[in-house]
Amino acid sequence: MPPLVTPWEVEALKSQLADAAEGRRFLLEGGDCAERFAECDAQVITDKLKILLQMSLVLVQGSKRAVIRVGRFAGQYAKPRSEDTETRGGVTLPSYRGDVINRPGFTKAERTPDPQLLLRGYGRAALTLNFIRALVRGGFADLHHPEYWDLDWARNSPLAPEYRRVVSNISESLLFLENILGIHAGEIERVDFFTSHEGLLLAYEEAQTRCEERSGRWYNLSTHFPWMGMRTSDPNGAHVEYFRGIANPIAVKVGPAMTPDTLLRLMEVLDPHHEPGRLTLIHRLGAGRIAGCLPRLIRAVHDAGRTVLWCSDPMHGNTRLTGNGIKTRRFDEILSELEQAFDIHAAAGSRLGGVHFELTGEDVTECTGGARGLAEADLGRHYTSEVDPRLNGEQALEMAMLIARKMSAGPPTPALRTDPK
Ligand code: PEP
Ligand code: CO
């Protein structure tokens, strides 16, 4: 079957990521923890796109940089789990591992891995991407019409006035540029989207790995930008062996157990030629641990003479259980990890070049806090994630506004290169 993305798109993203590593762009990556086949649905996909577009506008304005938009979508179907099994009422069954492997219902049949799901996953990813491409190319993402991106809840949000200000500033700037250049900005009116997912299930990843004949390089064409999860980044493991052979830009999650030595070994294996844009390091350390863990990793990478794109995932180090055993995350802890990440990089002469969120455009109640002050008691109202808790649309937009504020107070942006794609 045909691949989902092309090598030239993958290479275009790699060159944008190289820019981000040097501070000329900023990476915004976000989407579900576990994408669901049942949510391969026009409304859900449109809302996800809308929230990422809105966040990116806010970030463009605050960071004074072009923003690279990457969805955790069109393939984010496989999950690593901390426990192999789950026990309820004395019955023990295999854990749910994502829609491409088994099903979340608590019966033996539903938890038994079903290889047909691999094919269904490929199909769902293709349908999702097809719709996203149609929306983007069809004018939905036209910067002249940001009103298309309004989410229903946003009209009544306390954040609405600030968001409107950002949008009107951007519309004015666009008009100014068009008037001064005397063109209707054809190329800049649309924005790009790229896809990413955790390259966890090697059977799925390998099936779409192909050799590009002209260059002789191998690409994973199920996604533009696969990442390696924290549990599968052993330099001697199968995932590293697979990832080192593909030419895509790749990311590695970096958790609190990562040592400088292991990180350097990993980088040597995955990026022996120091290729610009090849490697993104996504640290996910936790608000309470980042200050203790991150500085020595930054120093080791710097001393090895490497330039990488550093990205913060402020979600996965801040997961906690409520008294009732519900998995949640606190808005203020997520923000705290992010703010510390900006400061720690700046103090070390490095730079945070991107952010990675679990979020949805839906009005869910999975993380506490934010402008509306969601409390633990609210979590039961609309909690639909089968795995990790996501920021809802409003919390995600607020997070973008706070990052924008933080970045607009930070160091100035180097100019964007104008090389051909
Ligand atoms: C994830 O991104 O959903 C995930 C499982 O992350 P990590 O590998 O960082 O725990
Ligand atoms: Co997750």
Image (cartoon, helix red, strand yellow):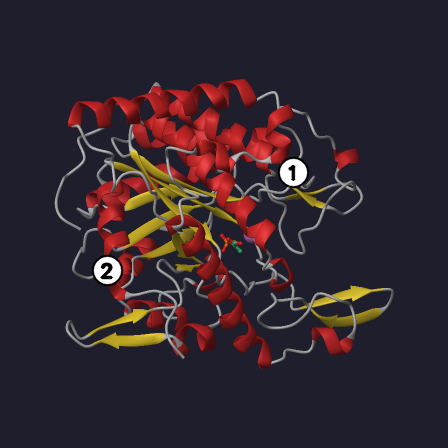
Residue 51: image x %, image y %? 51, 39
Residue 123: image x %, image y %? 51, 71
Q: Residue furthest right?
A: 89
Q: Is residue 61 left or right of residue 54?
A: left
Circles 1 and 2: CB atoms closer than 8 Å:
no
Q: Is residue 90 above or below residue 71?
A: below
Instruction: Report whether residue 314 is seen.
Output: no
Q: Label 1, label 2: how many angstroms apart (C-alpha)?
A: 36 Å
The amino acid type, in three-letter code, at marker 2 is Asp
Can you tell me whether the CB of the residue at mark 1 lies under 8 Å from the nearest atom of ligand 2?
Answer: no
Instruction: Report whether residue 39 is seen.
Output: yes
Residue at 37% x, 20% y: name it.
Answer: 169
Q: Which mark is residue 271?
A: 2
Residue 145, picture quadrant? top left
Residue at 36% x, 55% y: name it.
Answer: 251
Residue 227, picture quadrant? bottom left
Residue identified by numbered label 1? 367
Q: Is residue 419 left or right of residue 298?
A: left
Residue at 60% x, 50% y: name it.
Answer: 43
Q: Is residue 213 left or right of residue 289?
A: left
Residue 332: image x %, image y %? 58, 28
From the viewer's side, name the closer residue of 262 and 223: 223
Element carrying mark 1: loop
